[in-house]
Image (tube, rainbow, N blue to C red):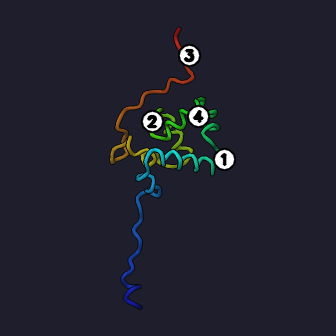
Amino acid sequence: MSDAKQSISKPTQRKSKHKKLLSLTPVQRRAWISCELKLRGLSNQKLAVQEGVSPQAISASAMGNGSSHLRAVLADTLQVPIYELFPEHFDSDGNPLAVPRQPNRNQKRKT
């Protein structure tokens, strides 16, 4: 066996199969989410209709802003752990940095 073959070690396994997501900027992540939705036959518009929100709300959540509920919907739809898709909202153990409030959509306003 040659020295080159002996010096090649087995690749280490990653803890996350979505490691590339950690290095994306919010704009890049939104574009990645949009592409992944299209691969699944969805769009911001279709997902917004399913969730009863505007496409802009989906887009804002894809950037890491907006509703924590919609961030969870995006993560579930893409089958990516939410703490990997939106690492800025979680500590190193995967715990949320802030307690999310309950969504108030579909509730009528008091007049």
Q: Quadrant of the N terminus?
A: bottom left
Residue that numbered label 3 is attached to: 108
The nearer-to-camera label among 3 and 1 is 1
Mark 4 nearby-residue class (10 Å; few <14, some 14–19, many ≥20): some
Residue 12 in the image: state x and y as whole percent: 39, 68
The nearer-to-camera label among 3 and 4 is 4
Question: Cα distance, mark 2 to mark 1?
Answer: 24 Å
Question: Cα distance, mark 2 to mark 3?
Answer: 24 Å
Residue 47 in the image: state x and y as whole percent: 61, 38
Q: What secondary structure is marked by label 4?
A: helix
The nearer-to-camera label among 2 and 1 is 2
Q: Amino acid at mark 3?
A: Lys
Q: Earlier in the sequence, mark 1 or mark 4?
A: 1
In this image, 52 relative to 89: left or right?
right
Q: Amino acid at mark 4?
A: Pro
Q: What secondary structure is marked by label 1?
A: loop
Circle 2/circle 1 CB separation < 8 Å: no
Residue that numbered label 1 is attached to: 41
Question: Cα distance, mark 1 to mark 4?
Answer: 16 Å
**In percent of the image, x 39 and y 86: which residue is there?**
4
Q: What secondary structure is marked by label 2?
A: loop
Circle 3/circle 4 CB separation < 8 Å: no
Question: Cα distance, mark 3 to mark 1?
Answer: 32 Å
Q: Earlier in the sequence, mark 3 or mark 4?
A: 4
Q: Earlier in the sequence, mark 2 or mark 1?
A: 1
Q: Earlier in the sequence, mark 2 or mark 3?
A: 2
User: In this orientation, which residue lies closer to the viewer: 25 or 107?
Assistant: 25
**In percent of the image, x 40 and y 90: which residue is there?**
2
Residue that numbered label 4 is attached to: 55
Q: Amino acid at mark 1?
A: Gly
Q: What secondary structure is marked by label 3?
A: loop
